[in-house]
Amino acid sequence: MSENDSSARVDFVRTIVAEDIKSNKWQGRIATRFPPEPNGYLHIGHAKSICLNFGIAEEFGGTCNLRFDDTNPVKEEDEYINSIVEDVEWLGFDWGEQIYYASDYFAQMYAYAVELIKAGKAYVCDLNAEQMRQYRGTLTTAGKNSPCRDRSIDESLALFEKMKNGEFADGSKTLRAKIDMAHPNLNMRDAVMYRILHAAHHRSDDKWCIYPTYDWAHGLEDSLEKITHSICTLEFENHRPLYDWFLDELKIHHPQQIEFARLNLTYTIMSKRKLRKLVEGDFVNGWDDPRMPTICGLRRRGYSPEAIKNFCKTIGVAKFNSTIDMSLLEHCLREDLNKTSARVMAVLEPLKVVIDNYPPDEIEQLDAINNPQDQTAGTRKVPFSKEIYIERDDFMEEAPRKFFRLTPGREVRLRYAYFITCNSVVKDANGEITELHCSYDPATKGGDAPDGRKVKSTLHWVCAKSAVEAKVRLYETFFAKENPDKTEEGQDFTANLNPESLKELTGCKAELSLADAKAGQRFQFERLGYFCVDPDSSENELVFNRTATLRDRWKKINQK
RNA sequence: UGGGGAAUAGUGUAACGGUAGCACGACUGACUCUGAAUCAGUUACUCCAGGUUCGAAUCCUGGUUCCCCAGCCA
């Protein structure tokens, strides 16, 4: 099994976890967490973190909490909570009995803050945001102490209580840790622990008008949940000394924080802020637009959870700031879809073919294999008759040398049906080909010639009489540039949108068996790619999203 | 010009003082009732300069480049 080689080399996070188990560091206990802020939708970058945290819990017999880091009421909404829960569930992870919320700890956090004030380690500060910036100093120069820094413990205590009671305006006061305004790490220059925000919280409503900052809250959340390994992204490395300071001052459970590099993908942006701009600026049709790297976008596009999880496993975890090639994601996608998708025939750009020597009223039911990669998938019947559609691309009146498909005088195979030969071409007034006339060889029924003669290619087709009408959305990379953030002066990433990212085809023809396909169902359209039924589908019209094309060697040859 | 991190084929990722491996990509070829899949093969890598060592991607010294930090965002 591949179990051996995959467990033989593990990423540096799992190495640490394994060592901690061996040394009995946490009495053999492993507890991780995935702590999103509910201020946006999850994307493939979050999937990396989800797979890491939940994956470690699964592999080492530990637990992984799903916790909403809801410390900023002005940005957070239930809509995001619901989508996040749905996405984590869809990916197939188990967070146990309950969902955790940072807001459930507000009272405890407040008590901890009082404790620090009493210990002389925190003080209420009257500086406003602008003043605080000036007092903070710069990267290369030390900051200055706040004039409130030496305020008495009792005064801070009283003021802090008044802050909590809503007696002060937003932004007029803060609670700050008393650390060191000359510290080379700016995070340690008397970090803000509480800010005044008269805003309704999505869960605690208006119970609180002071809210903990992330820096103050996050380590406490992990501590309260007895997390052993707080896995987060690189940008929090600078904050670790601050979390350490809080936890050590309070003398409470102190998880080990481990930082890893977040995921970057070519032709993709991953910033929540920018994704929101795409949604709010109507550059896309919502968070679940199939061009979005969001989990719900990928789901609608036709990605499977397995493909995403496999991708996350393949890319590994490290501290190097890397950008993964989109082709690797597509590889993982195709790898899974190839194994699992039912094959079906559909014609995107139909060209009518009349089989002159086929009986006019005959309809045959031919056997087709549902999935050559999966014997248990069985077979189905596809109807065949005198008039069929083939793909426009599969015919060329004047074919180049490497073109194996249909051309006047050449015989090709219709998949699972017959060998046909093209006899004549019908054109309209503009010279546009409207119809082909072919003849078939009845002896080749099913697709094999009894005389053993070979044919250069096999075409997919759809019986005209029974064809199901469909609309198909073809997607390409959403951005035209590998790095969408690389722009000319004065432009932003939206300047790099790929104008070809969505092309909608109407009048596509699908085989009869697709008539009752349901939203979310995935198929392989033979020779074309993987497609997924979009929720926009209705009684009388199917809508498909192209998840990915099949690899296409002809396209490459043709491009040369 | 402070502090914190990181550098291995085109892209990622292993090797933890002892043969630089794997995946993706690209390129050949075989096979094929999907120009798919599959199979076989080719390609190409230790940031630089010194040092230690029988032996260095790995240890030491110095340098280079990249990323993060001056929100009452997370």
Image (spheres, rainbow, N blue to C red):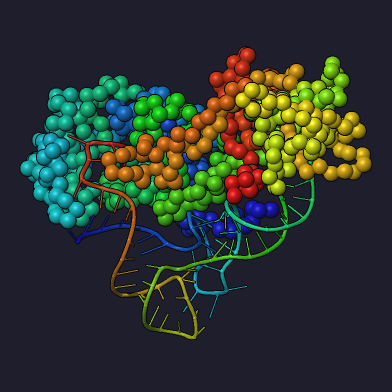
The quarter of the displayed image where residue A461 is located: top right
Q: Is residue B21 above or below residue A432?
A: below
Residue A342: x percent and y percent? 70, 32
Which residue is pictured at 81% across the width and 33% down the height?
A: A420
Residue at the extreme right of the image, as rendered:
A451
What x and y, as percent, mark residue A396? 69, 37
Query: Where residue A221 sits: x, y (%)?
Result: 35, 38
Left or right of A385 on screen, residue A52 = left
In the displayed structure, A3 sits above or below A221; it is below
Using the rendered image of the protein, determine whether residue A369 is visible from the camera's viewpoint.
no
Residue at image point 58% right, 19% down = A537
Looking at the image, residue A118 sits to the left or right of residue A49; the answer is left
Task: Identify the residue at horizontal 80%, vertical 29% (top origin).
Answer: A438
When the figure is inspected, residue B43 is found, relative to residue A155, above or below; the finding is below
Q: Residue furthest top?
A: A539
Given residues A157 and B14, the one toward you in this image is B14
Depth check: A268 or B22 in front? A268
Question: On screen, A278 above or below A141?
Answer: above
Residue A236 falls left or right of residue A551: left
